[in-house]
Amino acid sequence: LDKNIVKHNYKISKEDREKVLSQKAKILWFTGLSGSGKSTIANKVEQALNEQSYKTYLLDGDNVRFGLNKDLGFSDEDRVENIRRIREVAQLMLEAGLIVLCAFVSPFRADRDALRQAVNTGDFIEIFVDCPLDVCEDRDVKGLYKKARAGLIKDFTGISSAFEVPLNPEIILNTKELSIEKCVEKILSLLLQKIQNSDDSL
Ligand code: ADX
C-alpha cells in the first residue's frame, strides 16, 4: 500500500443509499463444487428478487473469469486472488445498497471468512451448495470432470485441488436431495426474514 494514499470520507453512507433504494443490502455467497448447482440456484434467486423489485447483482465465477479476473488460473494462489478481488467488488456493491449474489467455488475457508469479517454480521449469508462429488461428476454438465480425471485439467476442485467445507454456513442446500425450487424457497425465506428484522428505518 502506497504511504501517500489517504482515505477520503464519503458523505453518503450505505444506509443513505439503502433508504433511497428502499431495501437492505446483503451478500448471498454461494460456495460449492463445480456442478453443485450454485449458478443455477443463484440465477433463480435473483429472478425471484427482481420480480419483487429488489435491486440485485449476480457475480458468477465463470463470467468474472472472462473479464476482471481473466489473468487468473486455478492454482491455490490464483484462487486466493480471484476471491480477494470478488470480495472487494462485492463489498462495493454492498455499500451501494444492492443485494449481491456471489457464485464461486471459493474452496478456501479463510477467503470466505475474510468477507464475513469485513462486513457487518448479518449482511453476509453463506450458502453451502452441498452436493456429493460423485453426483457432480455424474452430472458433469461442462465435461470438466471427465477431462480432470483424464489428467487434462490440473488443480481441479474435488479431484486434484482441495475444497474446505464451510463450518458454520447460514444455509446448507443438499442439491442431491432437494429440488431447485426448494433451495430457492429456503434462501428467500431466510433473506426476507433478515431484511425485515433489520428493517427499522425504511
Ligand atoms: S474459484 O475456485 O476460484 O472460486 P471459480 O468459481 O472462479 O473458482 O471458477 C470455477 C469454474 O471454473 C467452475 O465452475 C468450472 O466451470 C471452471 N473451472 C475450470 N478449471 C477449473 C478447475 N481447475 N477447478 C475448478 N473449476 C474449474
Image (cartoon, helix red, strand yellow):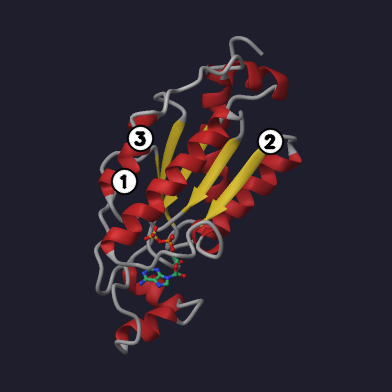
Question: Quick one: label 3 or label 2, which is nearer the N terminus?
Answer: 3
Spot occupied by residue 37 in the image (x, y as percentages of width and height): 49, 61
In the rendered structure, which amino acid carries the disc numbered 2? Lys
Q: Is residue 132 above or below residue 15?
A: below
Q: Is residue 129 visible?
A: no
Viewer-nearest of discs 2 and 1: 1
Res 56 quadrant in image: top right
Residue that mark 1 sits on? 111
Viewer-nearest of discs 3 and 2: 3
Rounded to the nearest angstrom, the CA distance separating label 3 from label 2 is 35 Å
In the rendered structure, which amino acid carries the disc numbered 3? Asp
Spot occupied by residue 21 in the image (x, y as percentages of width and height): 71, 25
Badge count: 3
Q: Is residue 41 above or below residue 142?
A: above
Residue that mark 2 sits on? 55
Are the residues at dot 2 and dot 1 in contact (C-beta closer than 8 Å)?
no
Residue 2: image tag: 3
SS class, disc 1: helix
SS class, disc 2: loop
Label 1: how many residues lie within 10 Å, few (<14), some (14-19) or many (20+)? some
Rounded to the nearest angstrom, the CA distance separating label 2 from label 1 is 26 Å
Q: Is residue 39 visible?
A: yes
Spot occupied by residue 24 in the image (x, y as percentages of width and height): 59, 24
Label 2: how many residues lie within 10 Å, few (<14), some (14-19) or many (20+)? some
Residue 12: image tag: none
- Most extreme residue toward the front is 4
In the rendered structure, which amino acid carries the disc numbered 1? Asp
